[in-house]
Every structure is written in C-alpha cells, then in structure tokens.
Image (cartoon, rainbow, N blue to C red):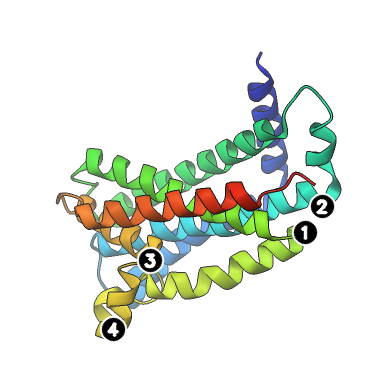
Amino acid sequence: MTAFLRLFLIELKLALRDHGNLFFMLAIPLFVLVIFSISFKTVDALLPSMAVAVSLALNALYLVPTYLGAYRESGVLRRLSTTPMHPGLLLGAQLGVQLLITVIAVALVVITSAVLGIALPRNPGGALITFALGALAMFAIGILIAALSSSGRMASGVGILLYWPMAFLGGLTVPAEQMPALLAHIGAYTPLGAFRQSVHDTWMGGAVEPANLVIMAAYAIAAACFAAGFFRWE
C-alpha cells in the first residue's frame, strides 16, 4: 500500500468520524433542493443546479480550509515535514477525501431530483467537465483560504464569510433570474455563478458556454498560484 493511499484511508476514517460535518455536508444540499421545490412550487433543473453548487461551495470553502488550517495549527504539517513523507501527500489525501464527499453529495442530489420528478442530466459529458473545472476552482480557493489563515477557526470563519456573498451572487440563495440585472451580471463572473449556470445548462441538455469554462479555469489557476505562493507548512 502506497503512502498516499494510507494517508487517504486515515483521512477518510477521520472524516467519517466527524458525524456533524459529514451530516451537514450531505444534508444541506438536499434541504435546499426540497425546500426550494416547495417554496417555488416548481421542479426543474434550476433546483438541482443550485443544490449541486451549494454542496461544492460548502465543502471547498468550509471543510477544506478548516481541516488544513487545523493541521497547520496543531503542528501536523510541521511534523510530517521532518519525515520522508512529504506534507504535500496529506494535502492531496485531504482533498481526495473532500472530493469523494462532494461526489456522494452530488449523487444524492441527482437521486433526490429523480424522486421529485426532475429528469436526469441530459448532457452527462458536459456535466462531468463542469464538475471537474468547478471543483478545481473552488478547492483552489479553499486552499488559498487555508494558506492565508493561521488557525482552523480562522480558516472556517473566513470560508463562511466568503461563502455567503459568493452564494448570493452565484444564484444559490435566490435564482439569478429573480435578481437585479446588475447583480446577476456580476454573479455570472464568479466561480460559483459560472459553475451553477453550467450545471443548469448541461442538466437541460445544452452545451457548456465556453465563457463559463474560461471563468472557472481562470479562478482555478489564479487561486492555485496564490495558494502555492502563500502556503506554509508551519
């Protein structure tokens, strides 16, 4: 068994023991899907696209920086740096676990959508590309938050503070179609706005707008570069 796989399994066990956060990450997107379907009295692809974006955003902006910030604060990364096992392996294992949790949350959204009578995504290939780019962008932002935070508590606080305006502008709390035109236009250039719109488009069977792919890729590259420059192991 490789060092990375051992770390991945350890991180997975720790994540499964964190019942509160795990339940939160899996339940909130479903709550958004069901409650909004009741509130808006509609069942179409708008709702699952919002729920999928909520799942990715909460995981990337809250769990990822919280865990990484806590590991730095407790000295885990520093101790690993003195062993043959590079702390970068822990970073990769943690991201792998959070990506797995996000995939499970998205699968639950798809299943629940089908139960509510919403058709399954009609462009699965485009949906996979969208999810991959969206995950890269949002996880890169999560790592950047961890890089700039001195503790797990600070990282979680910054992540949540960033989540709410990004979620609003991205159309996760109020559908973009019901927002003022200026705010909707601004939200379209956020990573969550581009991701949610792309999920909606592919769910309806349309192609992904190249502009949305460029937006997500740009955020992923920029955040990753800044995170690499600011991230410290102790």
Q: Are marks 3 and 2 in contact (CB under 8 Å)?
A: no
Q: Are marks 4 and 3 in contact (CB under 8 Å)?
A: no
Q: Of callouts 1 and 4, which one flags the residue occurring earlier in the amino acid sequence?
A: 1
Q: Residue furthest top?
A: 1
Q: Are marks 1 and 4 in contact (CB under 8 Å)?
A: no
The answer to which image quadrant residue 159 occupies is bottom right
Separation (CA) of disc 1 from disc 4: 36 Å
**Element under label 4?**
helix
Separation (CA) of disc 2 from disc 1: 5 Å
Q: Of callouts 3 and 2, which one flags the residue occurring earlier in the amino acid sequence?
A: 2
Q: Are marks 2 and 1 in contact (CB under 8 Å)?
A: yes
Separation (CA) of disc 4 from disc 2: 41 Å
Q: Which mark is residue 151?
A: 1
Lateral position of residue 66 relative to residue 129, left or right:
right
Q: Amino acid at mark 1?
A: Ser
Q: Of callouts 2 and 1, which one flags the residue occurring earlier in the amino acid sequence?
A: 2
Which residue position is annotated with label 4? 182
Q: Residue at x 72, y 34 (%)?
A: 87
Q: Residues within 10 Å of mark 1 (few under 14, many from 20)?
A: many
Q: Amino acid at mark 4?
A: Leu
Q: Of callouts 3 and 1, which one flags the residue occurring earlier in the amino acid sequence?
A: 1
Q: Of callouts 4 and 3, which one flags the residue occurring earlier in the amino acid sequence?
A: 4
Q: Residues within 10 Å of mark 2 (few under 14, many from 20)?
A: some
**Element under label 1?**
loop
Q: Amino acid at mark 2?
A: Glu
Q: Residue at x 63, y 39 (%)?
A: 94
Q: Which mark is residue 207?
A: none
Q: Position of residue 182 (x, y in %)?
A: 28, 84
**Element under label 3?**
loop
Q: Which mark is residue 190?
A: 3
